[in-house]
Image (cartoon, rainbow, N blue to C red):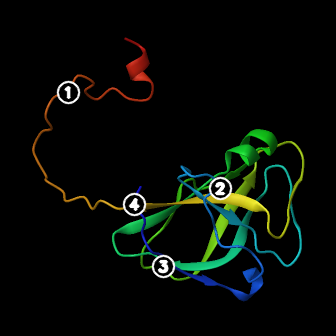
Amino acid sequence: MTAVSVSVQRLAHGADLPLPAYETAHAAGLDLAAALAAPLALAPGARALVPTGLAIALPEGFEAQIRPRSGLAAKQGITVLNSPGTIDADYRGEIKVILINHGSETFTVSHGMRIAQMVVAPVVRAVWDECAALPDSARGAGGFGSTGLK
């Protein structure tokens, strides 16, 4: 694995929270915690923008992806609405996570609760090569489940 240095700023409302950390030696994602002044009740079907109390400066050529935590999704139906969310290298504001409750019970988010994970990844920039026709492939234009039909 390759390490990349990322500048991080703890904001006042998250000053008591630990920095995101990899929970195991081979984990791809760092856990993000909620930085809340008061518990947040998330009713079934509701969504909320949850602050983390962190701002980062990614190096050029990298992004941070915000993804759901599998345990919250499987056990409570809590997920990240725009998953994966992207934090661009030039963004300097607070990282916030859009949580949605797909469960049947109200879910309470509390200060310090691990709510999402963040994956730092390299970015590849596309350069368009416009053409009159695309080369053939075995799949062709088939999509939306077409590969499981043959």
Which residue is tagged 3? 91
Please name the residue shown 75% across and 75% down the image: 17
Tag nearer the camera, 1 or 3: 3
For marks 4 and 1, give the CA distance: 34 Å
Closer to the camera in the image, 99 or 73? 73
Asked whether disc 2 touches disc 1, contact meaning CB atoms under 8 Å apart, the reply is no
Q: Quadrant of the N terminus?
A: bottom left
Q: Which mark is residue 2?
A: 4
Q: Earlier in the sequence, mark 3 or mark 4?
A: 4
Secondary structure found at label 2:
loop
Kindly check if marks 2 and 4 are in contact, taking CB atoms under 8 A apart as contact: no
The three-letter amino acid code for the residue at tag 3 is Tyr
* Secondary element type, mark 1: loop
Which is more foreground, mark 4 or mark 1? Answer: 4
- Residue 2 in which image quadrant: bottom left
Residue 134 in the image, given as x and y percentages of width and height:
15, 38
Mark 2–mark 3 CB contact (< 8 Å)? no
Q: Few, some or many C-alpha atoms within 10 Å of disc 4 (few <14, some 14-19, many ≥20)? A: few
Mark 4 / mark 1, whichever is N-terminal = 4
Q: Measure how far apart labels 3 and 4 are at the Cα level.
A: 23 Å
Which residue lies under the disc numbered 2? 23
- Residue at 37% x, 61% y is 122
Residue that mark 1 sits on: 137
Residue type at mark 2: give it.
Answer: Glu
Ranked by sequence position, the earlier of labels 1 and 3 is 3
> Distance of mark 1 from mark 3, alpha carbons?
39 Å
